[in-house]
Image (cartoon, helix red, strand yellow):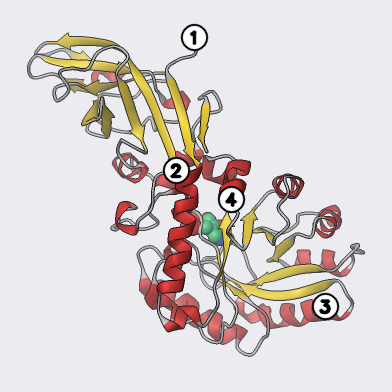
Amino acid sequence: MPRPISVTISLPALRHNLSTVMTRLLASSEAVRQTMPQVWAVMKADAYGHGLLNALYAFGQAQGVAMLDMNEAVRCRQAGWTGPLLLLEGFFEPADILVAAQYNLTVAVHTQEQLDMLMAAHPVRPLDIFLKLNTGMNRLGFAPQDYRQAYSQAQQAQAQGLVRHLGKMTHFASADDSPDVTAAQIAVFNQITDGLPGSVSVCNSAATLTDSLWATLKGAQSQWVRPGICLYGASPFARISAHALDLRPAQTLAAELISVRTIGVGDAIGYGQLFTADGPMRIGVVACGYADGYPRHAPTGTPITVDGVRTRILGRVSMDMLVADLTAVPQARVGSKVVLWGRGGPSVDEVAHASGTIGYELLCAVAPRVPRLVVQ
Ligand SMILES: Cc1ncc(COP(=O)(O)O)c(C=O)c1O
């Protein structure tokens, strides 16, 4: 018998979330609609822990898909994806350019080294590229003072038949909680790319779902948005829940109680004895620990659902187990269903918030040892 723990991936929820994003884009302001937004469904990190091919099948309505890894991109092509496929970090060595051309991959170009590699390459067909501008994230992208020079080099590559479509992109640092920072980044983007032709890709989930931001994106006749986290049913915003955004959890981490006991006043629980009972109480041991991907730093009070009743965890999370407070669940017994996050339980954002992290990290971190079930 395997341990009673599993992670369930819901393809209907993934489809629903994509449709929520697309419907919202179509229903939003004139400023958004004028840009004819198309969606690159971001599927990096094994589709945020949901399984690359699960996401690929579920996101069939997206105009394009985006990821990091060349091998993942090739797997998507081999699985039948014929639409645009963007590599968010582009290529890493000259041989990658040949693979990108062979599989018709669109690549981000964010360094002079990449441009030089491209100019020296002999791909079987021209590449579609998005030239990335660093507008303040200071991670990837050409510095504002270097961008237009890089753009004209990319145009030369176009003239030489190495590049087909030449687009422009950037990435926002704080679109989830700091409109001023985003406005400053957009101002830099507008100024530096002013008059340069080609489609534009700037919006992650938070920006995609912030209607007011779009009016400030100048001259972007063809926009490619790049939502990731919202497609998986978690919120990109700290103060707006996924539920309020009409997003459904696509990943559910569930387990069972494997032991139930009553403890008395003064009894402490688990490693470090971080929780001490101040009266008799029932507690249940859950077959899930940090080696399954549950955050070890989740403190007492982190929400959890037992037999459909919301309660809390107690004490320190161990490698293979954690303890739930059964005070509110008198009927709970060995075998009772526990939802750590997802459908029928707390949202991954709630667990992440209690643990001092973000839903992204938890969704990506479910361990390979946890059996994965897929709901078609
Ligand atoms: C370049 C790029 N675009 C889009 C995304 C998607 O972001 P989010 O998951 O916040 O929507 C990411 C994720 O980090 C990214 O690195």
Residue 245 horizontal side relative to residue 261, left or right: right
Labelled pair 1, 3 in contact (Cβ < 8 Å)? no
The residue under label 3 is 158
Instruction: Please state which amino acid type lies under the numbered disc 1.
Output: Met
Instruction: State which mark lies toward you, 1 or 4.
Output: 1
Residue 43, disc? 4
| Image quadrant assignment for residue 152 | bottom right
Which comes sooner in the sequence, label 4 or label 2?
4
Q: CA distance from mark 4 to mark 3?
A: 28 Å
Residue 232 in the image: state x and y as whole percent. 46, 48
Across and down, in percent, residue 38 comes to 57, 69
Please tell me how crowded label 3 is: few (under 14), some (14-19), or many (20+) other residues with Cα within 10 Å: some
> For mark 1, what is the residue?
1
Question: Does residue 229 appear in the picture of this structure?
Answer: no
Q: CA distance from mark 1 to mark 2?
A: 26 Å
Q: Are marks 1 and 2 in contact (CB under 8 Å)?
A: no
What's under tag 3, amino acid-wise? Gln
Rendered location of residue 83, percent (x, y): 70, 60
Residue at 51 percent of width and 60 percent of height = 227
User: Is there any visible trace of residue 24 in the rendered image?
Assistant: yes
The residue sitting at 72% across, 63% down in the picture is 106
Of pointers 1 and 4, the one earlier in the residue sequence: 1
**Depth check, front residue: 134 or 344:** 344
- Quarter of the image for residue 230 reads bottom left
Determine whether label 1 and label 4 are within 8 Å by CB: no
Label located before the other in sequence (1 or 2): 1
Where is mark 2, residue-wise?
A: 250
Please, what is the three-letter code of the amino acid marked with disc 2?
Ala
